[in-house]
Amino acid sequence: MKIYDYLIIGGGVCGCNVAYELHKHTSNILLIDKLDDVAKGASGAAGAFLSPLLGKPNNFKDLVTTSLPYAVNFYKQNTPNFIDNCGTIRIPKDDTDEDKFQSYIPFIDFPFEKKEAGYFFPIGSVVDSYGICKTLTQEIEKKLNYEVISIEYDGINWIINNEITTKNLILTTGANTKLIVEKYIDIRAIWGQRIDIETSTCISVNYHKECSVSKSTPLNTTTNKLSIGATHHRFVEERELSEEDTNELLKKASDIVNLKDVKVVTMHGGARASSSDYFPIVGEVIDSSKTIEEFPYLKNGTNVNPSRFTRYKNIFILNGVGGRGFVIAPYLAKRLVENIVNNEPLEESITSDRLFKRWVKNEKNRS
Ligand SMILES: Cc1cc2nc3c(=O)[nH]c(=O)nc-3n(C[C@H](O)[C@H](O)[C@H](O)COP(=O)(O)OP(=O)(O)OC[C@H]3O[C@@H](n4cnc5c(N)ncnc54)[C@H](O)[C@@H]3O)c2cc1C
């Protein structure tokens, strides 16, 4: 019987980056997805734009600031045909937004200059989500069109659907978190739609205002193709692709660029997976029942060193990357694999520990 070193469930940008990083240590990896190819979930719906987060200093902004140059360099090095580092012009929505931008200037972490009606950030990029995921996993064994219904630990290995055995299990299932029933892992789905259009208008950079418009690619001498993204519908795991969303995107895009001879060619939809505090969830997963059984006084607010929490054996997660998966997944996948293979620590702000602690505290308030 074959036993994999690592089995990854979910072939989106998170799963593909984790597979790529793990492959540096072993080739005995299986990547599973219920869909017929990689990048068919949220990852296939993404624009996928890479751009700085503006604002006053906070931990999430720091994470994006670290991840963005890492991602741009990573894609340029490993998937050079699928990134266009053409820069992005960010246009304030109105006077209030312009004032906000001015107040953020002391905290902007990347070079920029005034251009057209906004501010040009040379680091801004757009990637081809399918090309990236396909290239990163070209040497990885895959099992597609295969839905994982059950995962069971036999004391040594994890058994998937009673038929595939692995020493370690990585869950990168995006908005679907049914495989681990842990209330503190409170992933919320935020549905979004992006459209690809043909237009006679040619654009040489990305734009972002109320939506993002990508640099165009020429199809012939008169027609160009570009992407417009994205809409947001909170807490919706699945939703039909809609004309209403398409019209909203076209309206917002035409407020940015004068798009001529527009023909909508494709619509793509998917559910972004966000945690309750919008931070990602990386690393081991705490077994809440066993931890509370061992430390019942946690519910009274007593502090317990997290190193004593009971964790599922050999099971790891990378999820909750929200609307910036293409920006933060390469960096987080590297951190996760360093954690798994070399025991490198992960800061609490990105592990499930913070969510568990918060959840236990709320349980106390409820009881
Ligand atoms: C419209 C839209 C626009 C976006 N634009 C951007 C953008 O411009 N820039 C950016 O950085 N991010 C963007 N995002 C966000 C980005 O797409 C996500 O952050 C990222 O794709 C999440 O990747 P993931 O691997 O976690 O999830 P997914 O890509 O959803 O991958 C999860 C995979 O797990 C599989 N799976 C789940 N359960 C099972 C199971 N039980 N068995 C087998 N397979 C299973 C699913 O089929 C799926 O393929 C956008 C998202 C949307 C929806």
Image (cartoon, rainbow, N blue to C red):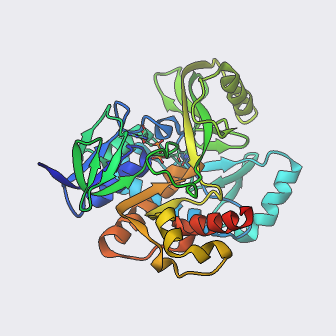
Q: Of all residues shown, which one is farthest toward the right? A: 95
The residue lying toward the viewer, choosing from 282 and 40, is 282
Residue 229 appears anywhere in the view: no
Quadrant of residue 317 in the image?
bottom left
| Image location (x, y in percent) of residue 113 | 68, 58
Which residue is found at the position 66% from the left and 53% from the top?
Answer: 120
Front-most of 54 and 286?
Answer: 286
Which residue is at 62% across, 67% downward?
360
Q: Is residue 260 left or right of residue 37?
A: right
Whether residue 294 is situated above or below residue 320 in the rendered picture? below
The residue closer to the viewer here, 121 or 365, is: 365
**Residue 293 in the image, given as x and y percentages of width and height:** 51, 70
**Residue, x 55% and y 56% (percent of image)?**
185
Q: Which residue is depicted at the point 74% across and 67% down?
A: 56
Q: Which residue is most to the left?
A: 1
Q: Quadrant of residue 260?
A: top right
| Residue 149, above or below 75 | above
Counting every numbered tag in the picture gives 0
Does residue 105 sit above or below 196 in this rendering?
Answer: below
Q: Quadrant of the C terminus?
A: bottom right
Q: Position of residue 170 (x, y in %)?
A: 36, 55
Pinpoint residue 343: horizontal percent, then vertical percent: 35, 75
Q: Is residue 334 left or right of residue 363?
A: left
Q: Is residue 265 visible?
A: yes
